[in-house]
Amino acid sequence: PLSFEIASCGFSTGFLSGFKQLIRWADLIHYHFPWPFADLMHFFAKPDKPYIVTYHSDIVRQRLLGKIYQPLMHHFLSHADRIIATSQNYLESSPILQDYLERAEVIPIGLATQGYIEPSDDQVEEMRNLAGDGFFLFIGVLRYYKGLHYLLEAVATTNLPVVIVGSGPEEKKLKRRAAELSLQYVRFLGHVSDQQKLALIELSKAIVFPSFLRSEAYGVTLLEGAMHGKPLITAKIDTGTSYINQDQKTGFEVSPADPIKLREAMNRLHEDSGLVERMGAAAKQRFHQLFTGEQMGKRYAQLYKSFNTSEL
């Protein structure tokens, strides 16, 4: 159970002994980064087992705590047998990973298409009655780095329809700003079910994902949009978003924190249905080439087997 949090990092005072018990049977330990509590568990448990680390993101915001954490972080990463970045872009642009390139490789996050239950016609119609269709869709937690305040600025004085799905710490501020700008074509839907989400993706024109800081390391919503043949609009932040979305091919990549460029990209799709169709088809093709759950699973299975863990 969660005991306390420091800077959004969860800690469990009772889990250290539990962790030691869990890893007794294991041939290989697979950690996910960043989660400083995992580094602490490994440091105190001192398991005599090989371990790999999936590196999802740099620690971007915590400057003071980041400096305190750095010695433990580098000790943890420097002893890892393999470090897995989730995109080539992140591997090349992360200042931390530059110290560990000799033991790093890339395995993109993938989605298993069979895990998605497509919505019924009634569910699609329900969402159409609620949100319309042909809109630009954002799905995610409403956090500071998602760039949604720039999205609101981008559609001010336009008739570009936007649907924002999700909740989070920025929700009240964003709704207040939307009211100040008199945005008649922006809808906040809050939390929706998985099938409602898929219905909204089906009804949408494109996925808009204006995250402007490297805290946005990947963007699984982009994969969901690509899987369903939707064009993507992202900001150029040299993370996994730039790996999923190829500018001018699967969608548009615009300058970060730039409402004008964001509006221009949205307008191009809004005015050109042929472009929407071509970019959506390219996004779907790229998804099946690189981002399926089956491909990700096979790559990790190969990595596990490279440690001669035949029992697995």
Image: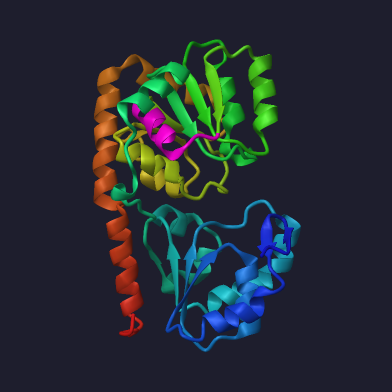
Asked if the magenta segment contains residue 195, the reply would be yes
Residue 114 lies left or right of residue 159; in this view the side is left
- The answer to whether one can see residue 35 in this image is yes
The quadrant the C terminus occupies is: bottom left
Name the image quarter holding residue 127. Answer: top left
User: Picture coordinates of residue 280 (x, y %)?
Assistant: 29, 32
Q: Residue furthest bottom?
A: 48
Q: Residue furthest front?
A: 122
Q: Nearer the viewer, residue 222 or 278?
A: 222
What type of secondary structure mainly makes up the magenta span? helix
Front residue of 289 and 262: 289
Vertical side of 63 occupied by 42: above or below: below
Relative to residue 107, is residue 303 depicted above or below? below
Q: Is residue 10 left or right of residue 159?
A: right
Residue 197 in magenta?
A: yes
Q: How is the image coloured?
A: rainbow
User: What span is colored magenta in the figure?
Assistant: 191-202
Count of marks placed on residues: 0
Q: Quadrant of residue 241?
A: top left
Please state, as top left, top right, bottom left or bottom right, where the N terminus lies in the image: bottom right
Residue 61 position, x and y percent, is: 67, 51
Q: Name the residue located 47 percent from the left edge and 40 percent from the top edge.
A: 236
Q: Residue at x 73, y 64 (%)?
A: 3
* Image location (x, y in percent) of residue 147: 58, 34
- Picture coordinates of residue 188 (x, y %)? 56, 25
* Left or right placement of residue 11 versus residue 184 in this view: right
Relative to 300, say whether 190 is above or below.
above
The answer to whether one can see residue 205 in this image is: no
